[in-house]
DNA sequence: TCCCGTCGAGTCAACGTTGTCTCAGCGTCG
DNA sequence: CGACGCTGAGACAACGTTGACTCGACGGGA
């Protein structure tokens, strides 16, 4: 269990420019110039300074530097997601990180767990650290607390969900159209009784997907039935329970539209537990790993997470580069991936 | 596509303590005291200051504060993972974030993509931002570049993989024992020809797991056969190809031990493509979502990611709290989860 | 009444860095 | 040969904040 010796007897504090300057026998400002690669330094002196810096293990203090510098930039942005461990959030922040990396910018990541209070807290914590900008997948429904921050020059971009009571750049998937596509796909397979299972309706994406569901039914002249609609929240367990209840109804649905990742997986589990995976059609919103390897494969409306993240990050950096144009709301299209579960026809399995 | 009006005509810079002080008619130091909740301030004055701060939308500048403060702490730590988008890294950083959150500490996350140069770069970038400490899943095999940083007082903890040429706290899974358990499990099911598929052997975890594989074979008096050993690297595609080649050998293995996540999934795909998923036994190292829902379910050696991350974070914070004890190397046990694929017996399916 | 201790607020310098200005030294040109 | 421009390095102040110290007012005890 135990290993080596004490890590360091006296953790001497970090060397500063002053110490480098002393060792190199130059003024502190000259060290600054060398570190910042200002060309008007005698190469011989520059070499001496660099040698001294290496010898001391000198590393510039970016926080001090950004404090003094004109623009006050920290080369750090903040990213607030629902949960850094979930695949959607993880993919999103990785994409943002990639864009940031190209500019030497680092990303502070925070998880909100759908808690609006936590959103405010963390946004403040990021601002207190003077991040140059913020990419937010919001949890709350009131973002007016960011108005003063925007006015103070902190750029904010919303991804996946729109801001409320705030004017800010936004990048979202075309949730409504995606849901319409999903339901139309099931209608085309002959289904007339299509259940909806989704996250709480207070979440804007869930609301939009639900809206698309209702709209598609309406256009297809299918009466809306509250009985087969469940806003369960984003957990596998509750989705499993809700799906079970739906399928044991006297007049059960012949198809499911699940509008969120965990809900989709919960429904998949429930269908399999009931042995109905080849009988009840199923389309989920948002793709997930291994969806293709199940049998049947799960048909999904896939979001372009890469595009979502990249667009958001690029909008943010354009603002940081001085873009003062009106705020924009960008919608990223979704696409249907047919894998089997969504193509089960209404009369039961293998009727086509 | 377009939305609102210009975000702000003149992005006034952020209000400072000086401005709050002016508005409240007090000295700047008094504002400092109020912000830091020093109790020796007249409640009436404190209220006036707070009012002024709110009016101006004042937010303290933590970078300036940490510069001046005695300890120089930024309440920020750095976390370097293989790829923030992969489930293992994501779960790990989320756990670290959780521990950090309890202390009001934020986490800067960076992805290394197995690139040692990138590891050094990012570690430096984090240090330049004066993070209080670093949690690293290393990509490189030489961490001596961190020696001077350690001496300068930056705490470093390694997770999942050991450091090389550096004495630092470390938390890893019991990779060797996990592999031994996996292979023993397959031996118990009667297998004598067990293939190994894993990540590149230069990666320490892969090497340890391979070592466990060889050791278990040796103890079981099974001759080692190079033919059925593949160090493919961590990609589904190459794992698929390697698995296919293994199973079309004249004397193919009757069981697979896959020592990495993506390799496991690749093998699963290949087995299904060949229709051998119920014939060839399979145990993977590291659990993955939906492993239980496949048929057969995939038996795995599960790592306790939660424990790994939490232990690492706690070790780091203990160092930050002044712990000067010798560095420690903690090993977290793994556990076998039986789901079906690993219990397929040697004679073919359903022979037990 | 006077002295001293206490309490609360203010002054000053400093954290590590960089923008602005100054200045010494050198070469050039009239 | 002296004025001038130019080049390269240093002095100084400032970024926003806080630690150390100061100072005035007030209250109590002798």
Image (cartoon, coloured by chain):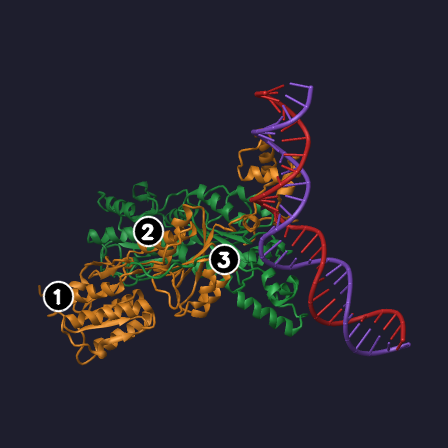
Chain colours: A orange, B green, C red, D purple
Determine if residue A274 is in view. no
Q: Earlier in the sequence, mark 2 or mark 3?
A: 3
Discs 2, 3: same chain:
yes
Q: Is residue B82 left or right of residue B123?
A: left
- Viewer-nearest residue: B312 or B251: B312
Discs 1, 3: same chain:
no
Chain ID at mark 1: A
Which callout, 1 or 2, points to the residue nearer the camera?
A: 1
Q: Measuring 63% from the left and 39% from the top, which residue is drawn there?
A: A20
| Element on which disc 1 rests | loop
- Viewer-nearest residue: B329 or A108: A108
Mark 3 is surrounded, within 10 Å at the Cα level, by few (under 14), some (14 to 19) or many (20 or more) other residues, namely: few
Across and down, in percent, residue A253 comes to 18, 74
Determine if residue A170 is in view. yes
State how far apart marks 1 and 3 are (Cα): 58 Å
Residue B12: image tag:
3
Quarter holding the C terminus of chain A? Answer: bottom left
Residue A189: image tag:
1
Chain ID at mark 2: B
Q: Is residue A334 left or right of residue A192?
A: right
Chain ID at mark 3: B
């Amino acid at each position: 269990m135990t290993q080596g010796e004490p890590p360091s007897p006296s953790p001497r504090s970090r060397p500063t420019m002053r110490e480098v300057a002393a060792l190199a026998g130059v003024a502190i400002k000259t060290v600054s110039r060398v570190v910042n690669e200002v060309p008007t330094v005698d190469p011989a002196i520059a070499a001496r300074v660099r040698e001294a810096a290496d010898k001391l293990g000198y590393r510039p203090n970016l926080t001090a530097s950004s404090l003094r510098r004109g623009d006050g930039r920290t080369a750090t942005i903040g990213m607030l997601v629902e949960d850094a461990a979930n695949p959607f959030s993880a993919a999103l922040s990785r994409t943002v990180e990639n864009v940031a990396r190209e500019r030497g910018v680092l990303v502070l990541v925070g998880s909100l767990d759908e808690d609006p209070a936590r959103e405010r807290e963390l946004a403040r914590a990021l601002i207190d650290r003077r991040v140059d900008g913020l990419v937010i997948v919001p949890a709350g429904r009131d973002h007016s607390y960011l108005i003063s921050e925007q006015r103070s020059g902190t750029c904010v971009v919303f991804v996946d969900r729109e801001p409320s009571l705030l004017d800010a750049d936004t990048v979202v998937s075309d949730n409504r159209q995606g849901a319409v596509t999903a339901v139309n796909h099931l209608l085309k397979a002959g289904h007339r009784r299509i259940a909806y299972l989704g996250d709480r309706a207070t979440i804007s994406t869930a609301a939009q997907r639900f809206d698309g569901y209702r709209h598609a039914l309406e256009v297809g002249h299918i009466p809306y039935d509250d009985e087969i609609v469940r806003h369960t929240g984003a957990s596998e367990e509750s989705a499993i329970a809700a799906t079970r209840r739906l399928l044991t109804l006297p007049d059960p649905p012949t198809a499911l539209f699940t509008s969120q990742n965990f809900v989709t997986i919960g429904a998949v589990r429930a269908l399999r537990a009931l042995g109905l995976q080849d009988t009840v059609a199923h389309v989920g919103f948002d793709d997930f790993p291994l969806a293709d390897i199940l049998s049947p494969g799960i048909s999904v409306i896939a979001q372009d997470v890469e595009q979502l993240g990249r667009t958001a990050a690029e909008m943010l950096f354009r603002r940081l580069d001085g873009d003062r144009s009106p705020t924009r709301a960008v919608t990223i299209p979704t696409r249907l991936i047919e894998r089997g579960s969504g193509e089960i026809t209404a009369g039961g399995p293998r009727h086509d």
